[in-house]
Amino acid sequence: MGTESGAVEQSEWPGPLPARRERALVREAQGGSRSALAALYAAHWRRAHRAAYLIVHDAAVAEDVAQDAFLAAVGALDRFDRRRPFAPWLHRIVANRAIDWARREALRRRVDGAGEREQLARPPEGLGEDVMEALAELPAEQRAAIVLRYLLDYTPGEIAGMLDLPRGTVNSRLRRALDRLGTQLEAER
Amino acid sequence: MNEARLRSLLREAPIPVSEDSERRGLEVLEAALAEREPRRAPVTSPRRLALALAVAALLGALLLSPAGAAVRDWVDDVLTTAPRPGPGLAKIPGGGRLLVQSRSGPWVVQADGSRRLLGNFEEATWSPRGLYVAAASGRTLTALKPDGTPRWSLSAAAPVSDPRWSPSGYRIAYRSGGGLRVTDANGTRDRLIDPAIAPVAPAWSPLGLSQLAYVGADGSLRFADGESRRMIERARALPGIKRLEWAGETLLEASATALQLRSISVSKLAQGIEVGPPRGLPLPAGATVRDATLSPDGEKVASVLGVRGRLGPRGLVVVFDDGGGGRRLFNAPGRLSEVAWAPHGGRLLIAWPSTDQWLFLPTGRGEGRSVSEVSAAFAPGARVASFPRIEGWCCSGWIGQRG
């Protein structure tokens, strides 16, 4: 059923697919193979969903963003260059759509006043709760930079390419975000 | 605390996720893959190109010649006679499952023709992947499994009608007390979207997070967000509108005498909507619209029209493409009442109450099938049986196989 919520996803982190295997799966998916698509999805969904959640801090929207990114990827499968890795392509879509949504939501809150979303946005209690709350306080652009750098392990140069930004801008966003997270991180020490 | 600790926290901190979200996402994705146009190999051989051109020229000459007129007519009107009636419903041609509303309540018909009465409900609708049915009865909205097991019920202040499950599976819209309401698909967070709307079923965006279209009490076409309740866009609806559908990037409006389409452009994350100008579909003079519905991809409209023939009323099935060009698929004496697309398009189910039959017609070439004695099939033991209403034809074959 649609919104049986309450489950909490935790501590899963499948390793990346070998490049050759991934290229083969993309080729088969381009040919319409459902099993290849399912394998790609299984390898990438949780990472994409977690990245989306850490940027938007809304469970339902994170699912939609991740799903939307996969749908966009499937829609563009025929144009995908198999020599390139699949993950950065997908993560680029996830990050940009999540940022777009977060910006829009921030604007809506300014116009409408804080409402239902704030209640939904409260992170679950548990490991790293303080950090999650601190992350939620950052601007969406900084959250995205942190997520791409420290969750998905992209270099600042790669992040710059994914977000269409100068590398210096990415570095400064990372620096500012780490500074703002510092209080919580220090407090945990 | 260092960067390694931050990495670890980001990877391991618990985040909320609904139980079925991963599986649901994969189902949507697989459906999208199935609907994708297969990649076509480029024609590289000059000989093949020349051959294709020659065949095209020959066909063109044939169609333009007097003798070719007969061929053209045949192409225009694929079926002029009904398929020979078969016995009762033993199997659904093309697969999938049907939701059928009889006087005694909604029935689920499985692909093998077996059927089950769900209970005493006045109308029903499929969830997007056919895992559930939302049914309305009096002031109650109920979600139940296709085997009839109820999951939850919601009591409204006024009679409930026209439930519509959103394509995401997360929400159900329905009319009640003259207004439009939306509930989460687990029966919680029921909210009022608009207090005064026209008696037309709402239509969810096939792409968006939570946008839906409906007709306001003032006859305006409205687009609202079913989550934030925000009004997004407004336009003038087709006068006398009775049916609204949204599939692909197309919105269909139908009245008793007219059909029109609009292109709808949705910015999913920005939650903005651009509504294109209406484009009327050409109908035969004097025709009445009995029913019309968009194909699953939103690129075709199947319509059932009533026309006056020399020997009495006739039913006409016309399929329009996205450009507005119409193609007569079938015509028959008497009254045709409803039309439904097969889940993957390519086949139509036509209700023909005058002969107590359902017709399963391919929209291209292929053999049509007819099922007779439809009324009795959904009124076991009754002396007088009324012809049932088709509520929906669901879903992709691979989902149906999962039950």
Image (cartoon, coloured by chain):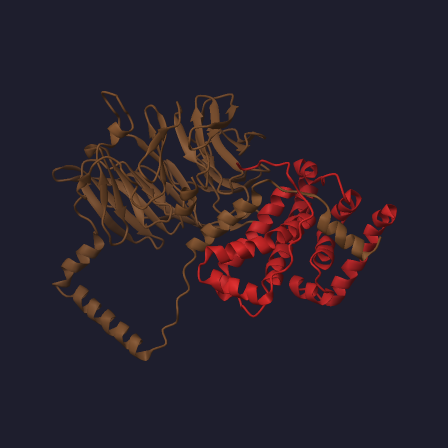
**Quarter of the figure with the C terminus of chain B:** top left
Rendered location of residue B91, percent (x, y): 29, 40
With B203 as the anchor, is B329 left or right in this view? Answer: left
Which residue is more in the foreground, B220 or A8?
A8
- Where residue B344 appears, as percent x and y from the top left, is 37, 49
Q: Judge left or right: residue A87 versus residue B149.
A: right
Q: Position of residue B273 (x, y in %)?
A: 52, 48
**Picture residue at 69% right of the left edge, 50% below the top:** A55
Q: Is residue B166 shown above or below A164?
A: above
Looking at the image, residue A58 sits to the left or right of residue B334; the answer is right
Q: Which chain is brown?
A: B
Between residue A137 and residue B97, name the one nearer to us.
Answer: B97
Q: Nearer the viewer, residue B164 or B384?
A: B384
Image hue for chain A: red
Residue at 47% across / 51% down in the picture?
B30
Q: Nearer the viewer, residue B251 or B123?
A: B123
Task: Residue B23 in the image: state x and y as whole percent.
Answer: 54, 45
Camera sees residue B393: yes
Q: Residue at x 21, y 52 (%)?
A: B78
